[in-house]
Image: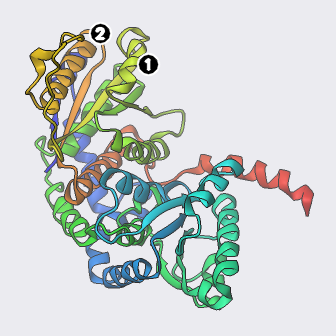
Amino acid sequence: MIKVDLSGAEKFWGDKGPDWALCAAAHRTLAEKTGLGADFLGWLELPQRIRDTELSRILAAGKKIREKGDALVVIGIGGSYLGARAAYDLLGRKGDGVELLFAGNGLSATTLQDTIRALGDRDFCVNVVSKSGTTLEPALGFRIFRELLVKKYGEKEAGERIFATTDARRGALKSAADKAGWECFVVPDDVGGRFSVLSAVGLLPLAAAGLDVEAIIDTAIAAFAALDERSEKNPCWQYAAARQALYGQGKAVEILGCYEPRFRMMAEWWKQLYGESEGKQGLGIFPASVEYNADLHSMGQYIQDGPRFLLETVVSFARENAGYIIPSDAADGDGLNYVAGHDLAEVANIARAAVKEAHIQGGVPNIAVEVSAMDEKGFAELVCFFELACALSGYMEGVNPFDQPGVEAYKKLMFAGLAAWK
């Protein structure tokens, strides 16, 4: 299970420290569904609901996609793709799993062409993920890849290679899917996009990629049950209350770091989760991310000596996925033969400890989050931990963690500009 270490943050709290009473009230509000956004708490029961309803269909569709080719183009933006992308980049393709390619999350023609080139002449399927079907970026992406399917396979077989994850009853994509006979999966009405990774939104692509989706769901069911503990021992309480205490001390920017480059898209998922949930009414900790060790040689100077409004959360994995023994060099030109024979992970651990201490000495509080392993179970634990902590933190801040009214601002202006073409 997730472990949180607050020892690197304690001296920055001042006299108050974490407000455990406020955190308890936030958890009670969440559990009793009496707070703002209570209509969007389906994510708390989502793993069990998926296990009882859609999981068998998701697994069957994943098998079907693997049988039809070796690539799946996942079309979606924001929460419609970030969770699947995060898990895929973190855990990789397994067994006979297909390669996942992602599209519809931007309007760059260069990136689109790069994706088409990466697809090449391989047999492929498309999973379009959109609750409405009218969001500009994925809607255009779907037009393009559907056309490629039709040109390659003809209208009938193309339809058999399209999988739509959308609203259960209404919307442009649901209507098109019903008319064309595409296989459909559900974006739950009571789950916001950024909380949807443990639904078909995230699980269908992961099943196609050969990941153990059943392990993800079973672990999530157990994790949410364990994280319902109402005490200061709950890691979600520790993280939520600590970051809010630090926010009260002027630490308005949180950098999420990890020493595994595979974690990069997990950090992007986290940034959406916390940015959309907390950034409203002039409030909210700004979520940013760094990739250690690389960013120690670019952002390290700013983190160490820049303005002191930063707090740092660092994710690590208790069990390494691989090891590598450092070789000896006869010439020893770099003077590092004294580390020869040691595992690279040993060096990494010493580097991590040094960075933590240096940043704390430099005025950056550190919250350490340890995950059991970089596997399906660890991914599920991390998702449940960050989701529940985010909800608690948002309620402690005094905002609705489950709406995103500001997201619509650019859309209105964008469609107003496009209206001239009608």
Q: Which of 301 and 312 is in front in this view?
A: 301
Instruction: Report the front residue among 411 and 38.
Output: 411
What kind of residue is marked 1? Answer: Ser
Q: Identify the residue position indicated by label 1 in the image.
A: 298
For mark 2, what is the residue?
362
Quarter location, residue 11? top left
Contact? badges 2 and 1 (CB < 8 Å): no
Provide residue 350's location: percent of width, then percent of height: 15, 22
Q: Which mark is first along the chain, 1 or 2?
A: 1
The residue mark sitting in front, 2 or 1, is 1
Between the residue at mark 2 and the residue at mark 1, the CA separation in whole angstroms equals 17 Å
Image point (32%, 76%), residue name: 50
Q: Which residue is pictured at 63% across the width and 50% down the height?
A: 111
Q: Is residue 76 visible?
A: no
Q: Quadrant of residue 246?
A: top left
Residue at the spot 54% in from the left edge and 38% down from the top edge? 281
**Left or right of 339 on screen, residue 176:** right
Residue 69 percent location from the top left of the image? 47, 76
Residue 390 lies left or right of residue 345; in this view the side is right
Q: What element carries label 1?
A: loop
Q: In this view, does 124 lie above or below 355?
A: below
**x, y percent for residue 230:** 14, 50
- Percent from the top left, x then y, of residue 2? 16, 47
At mark 2, the secondary structure is loop
> Which numbered dot is residue 147?
none
Which quadrant of the figure contains the C terminus?
Answer: bottom right
Q: Give me the residue at 38% from left, 44% from top.
A: 394
Looking at the image, residue 336 lies above or below residue 239: above
Q: What residue type is labelled 2?
A: Gly
